[in-house]
Amino acid sequence: MPNGVPIQRPDGPPPARLARFLADSGTDYEFVAPGLPMPTVAAAASAIGVPEAAILKTLVFQAADGDCVAAVAAGPARVDRRKLAAIVGVPRLALASPETVLEVTGFPAGGVAPLGHATVLPVVVDRAVLKLPVAWGGAGDESLLLRIDPAAIVRLTDAVVADIQADIR
C-alpha cells in the first residue's frame, strides 16, 4: 500500500495525476512540500536537508523529427547529449522548449517528475541514480518533491539504464 498523500483533488492538475499514477502502481512514495520554490538541485537539497546527489532532475530532450526522450540524472551531474542521442538512436538532441516539456510530460519545466508523464515517453535513467537508496525528484511544480525508490522509476517507465553523465574535464 503506498504511503503517498495526494495533494490535490483527483481530477486536478499534474501533482494529482502523478499521485493517481503512483497509487495505482502500488509504489511506495511521498510528496514533500518544504514551503519554498526549489528551482535548482542545490535549492531542493538544502530545502529538505539531503545531499545534492539524492536530488533527481528530469530533463526532456527533442530530436530533429520532434520525438522526445526524458533523461533522469542525479544531483549536479550534467547529461551528455551525445551519449543520450546514441542510446536513443538519433544524430543529435536539443533541450526541449518549456512548451514541449509541458505538452509531452504534463509537467512544467522545473518540476518534471521522472515518471507519470502525460504521454508515452522513452526514459533513460543514468546508472548512478540506481546507486541511491532513495531519491527525491520533481513532482509537478518547483515547490514540491517526490520521494521514491530509484528502481521504481525504471520499473514503472520501462527505462533504459545507461551512463548518460557528461565527463568532467
Image (cartoon, rainbow, N blue to C red):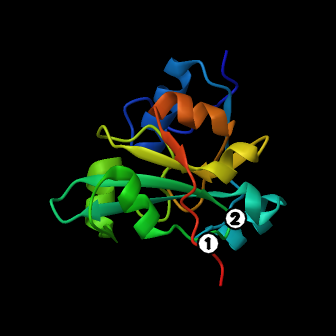
- Is there any visible trace of residue 14 in the rendered image? yes
Which residue is outermost to the bottom?
169
- Is there any visible trace of residue 145 in the rendered image? no
Q: Which residue is drawn at 22% across and 53% down?
A: 67
Pinpoint residue 131: horizontal percent, then vertical percent: 75, 45
Which residue is outermost to the top?
1
Position of the C terminus, as image quadrant, is bottom right
Asked if labels 2 and 1 touch by Cβ distance under 8 angstroms, the answer is: yes
Please name the residue that numbered disc 2 is placed on.
Answer: 44
| Circle 1: residue type | Thr
Is 48 positioned to the left or the right of 38 in the image? Answer: right
Please name the residue that numbered disc 1 is placed on.
Answer: 40
Q: Is residue 121 above or below residue 47?
A: above
The answer to which of 145 and 36 lies nearer the viewer is: 145
Q: How crowded is mark 2: few (under 14 residues within 10 Å), some or many (20 or more)?
A: many
Find numbered disc 2 in the image and state the secondary structure of the residue it sits on. helix
Give the Cα distance between marks 1 and 2: 6 Å
Q: Which residue is drawn at 50% across and 19% down?
A: 24
| Circle 2: residue type | Ala
Q: How crowded is mark 1: few (under 14 residues within 10 Å), some or many (20 or more)?
A: some
Position of the N terminus, as image quadrant, is top right
What number of labels is visible? 2
Is 136 positioned to the left or the right of 60 in the image? Answer: right
